[in-house]
Amino acid sequence: MPYVRERWAPYLRPSLLLCWMFYGVVVNGCPTKCSCSGPNVDCHGQGFRTVPKGLPRNSERLDLDRNNITRITKVDFTGLKNLRVLHLEDNQISVIERGAFQDLKQLERLRLNRNKLQVLPELLFQSTPKLGRL
């Protein structure tokens, strides 16, 4: 057994470092082309066609206005349990999937104006009891 330990010892530290770095990117990272300051994430006007991946889990405010987003899926905001303000205005959104806002229990303000929405799924806002401004 000592031989195995000695053989793998040089790889242990770099592997742990990579795991730690990956964890930091997933939990506290900021998507490319966005700027993150504390709980505020600003991705406005960057030409996104979809909601960017890797949004910080501690986000409280997310600005995605003035992009080219066409669809909001049920996994786009998964895990953003602290999100209070979400700006989606001035996009090309024509579809919001049922359950898209199900994790957003703290959501207070949502801007959806100037999109291409015609119909919203039933009970879309059922999981957002604090939503007071739409």
Image (spheres, rainbow, N blue to C red):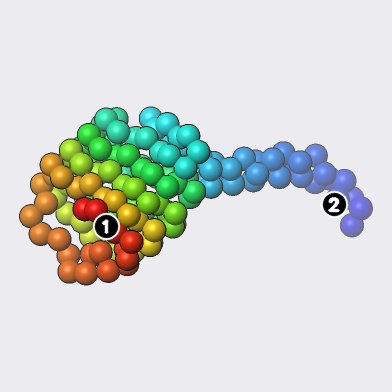
State the residue position of label 2: 4
Precedes in sequence: disc 2 or disc 1: 2
Q: Residue furthest front?
A: 132
Image quadrant where residue 75 sits: bottom left
Image: 63 above or below 124 = above
Question: Considering the numbered disc 1 on the image, is that residue within a helix, a strand or a loop?
Answer: loop
Callout 2 crowding tier (Cα within 10 Å): few <14, some 14–19, many ≥20: few
The mark tally for this picture is: 2
Q: Say whether residue 95 is left or right of residue 56.
A: left
* Residue at left offset 10%, top offset 59%: 119
Question: Considering the numbered disc 2 on the image, is that residue within a helix, a strand or a loop?
Answer: helix
Callout 1 crowding tier (Cα within 10 Å): few <14, some 14–19, many ≥20: few
Image quadrant where residue 33 sits: top left
Mark yes or no: residue 64 visible: yes
Q: Say whether residue 104 is left or right of residue 72.
A: right
Q: Residue furthest left?
A: 118
Q: Say whether residue 35 is left or right of residue 87.
A: right
Residue placed most toward the observer, 69 or 123: 123
Image: 132 above or below 113 = below
Image quadrant where residue 61 sits: top left
State the residue position of label 1: 132
Residue placed most toward the observer, 63 or 68: 63
* Residue at left offset 10%, top offset 47%: 116
Q: Position of residue 82 (x, y in %)?
A: 44, 54
Q: Say whether residue 95 is left or right of residue 1.
A: left
- The residue mark sitting in front, 2 or 1, is 1
Q: Position of residue 12 (x, y in %)?
A: 76, 44
Q: Residue furthest right?
A: 2
Q: Amino acid at mark 1?
A: Gly
Residue 56 numbered mark, or none: none
Check the picture and name the quadrant holding the N terminus: bottom right
Q: Find out whether the residues at labels 2 and 1 contact each other: C-beta distance under 8 Å.
A: no
